[in-house]
Amino acid sequence: MLFGDPSALIWNSTVAPPFGLGIIWNYQLDRGDSSNPEILLIGNQCVLVSHNFFPSSGPNYAFQIAAINQQMHYLSTNNAVGTDYQLTQFSLTNWPTIH
């Protein structure tokens, strides 16, 4: 996963994921696969980072946090959910870059 373009996340399905995961954990999407979630496994939790807009890229949600939280607040408070859900941010600053 590459954060090269500020508004998009880009991934390469031909590269094996790090830490011993096999290539089967990284597969090329095809037409019709749009909106499939793009996630990172952090600890024991799946973290949504994007969705597939093209077979190899999707939007960078970091630029949409305020808008997403606003809509989640609206949905929570106007549908008797009882809880105001908001995004939890996770810093990747201390994570190593893997080439």
Image (cartoon, rainbow, N blue to C red):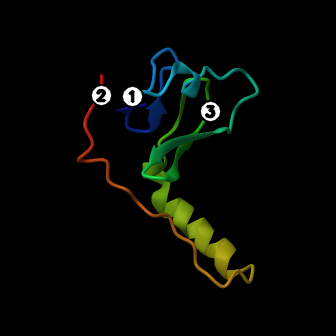
- Amino acid residing under circle 1: Pro
Image disc number at residue 53 = 3
Of residue 56 and residue 40, the one placed in the foreground of this image is 40
Which residue sits furthest front?
A: 20
Relative to 15, is 78 above or below?
A: below
Image disc number at residue 98 = 2
* Mark 1: secondary structure: loop
Q: Is the C-beta separation of discs 1 and 2 under 8 Å? A: yes
The 10 Å Cα crowd at callout 2, few under 14, some 14 to 19, many 20 or more, is: few
State the residue position of label 1. 18
Residue at 72% across / 29% down in the picture? 33
Query: Which corner quadrant holds the N terminus?
Result: top left
- Amino acid residing under circle 2: Ile
- Residue 59 horizontal/vertical position (percent): 52, 39
Of residue 24 and residue 64, the one placed in the foreground of this image is 24
Q: Quadrant of residue 98?
A: top left
- Amino acid residing under circle 3: Phe
The 10 Å Cα crowd at callout 3, few under 14, some 14 to 19, many 20 or more, is: some
Q: Quadrant of residue 56?
A: top right
Query: Which corner quadrant holds the C terminus?
Result: top left
Image disc number at residue 35 = none
Give the number of the mark in front: 1 or 2: 1
* Mark 2: secondary structure: loop
Of residue 50 and residue 26, the one placed in the foreground of this image is 26
Give the number of the mark in front: 2 or 3: 2
- Residue 11 horizontal/vertical position (percent): 48, 26
Calculate the distance from the C-alpha at mark 1 to the C-alpha at mark 3.
24 Å
* Mark 3: secondary structure: loop
For the image shown, how many numbered marks are present on the structure? 3
Labels 2 and 3: the sequence-earlier one: 3
Calculate the distance from the C-alpha at mark 2 to the C-alpha at mark 3.
24 Å
Residue at 68% across / 39% down in the picture? 35
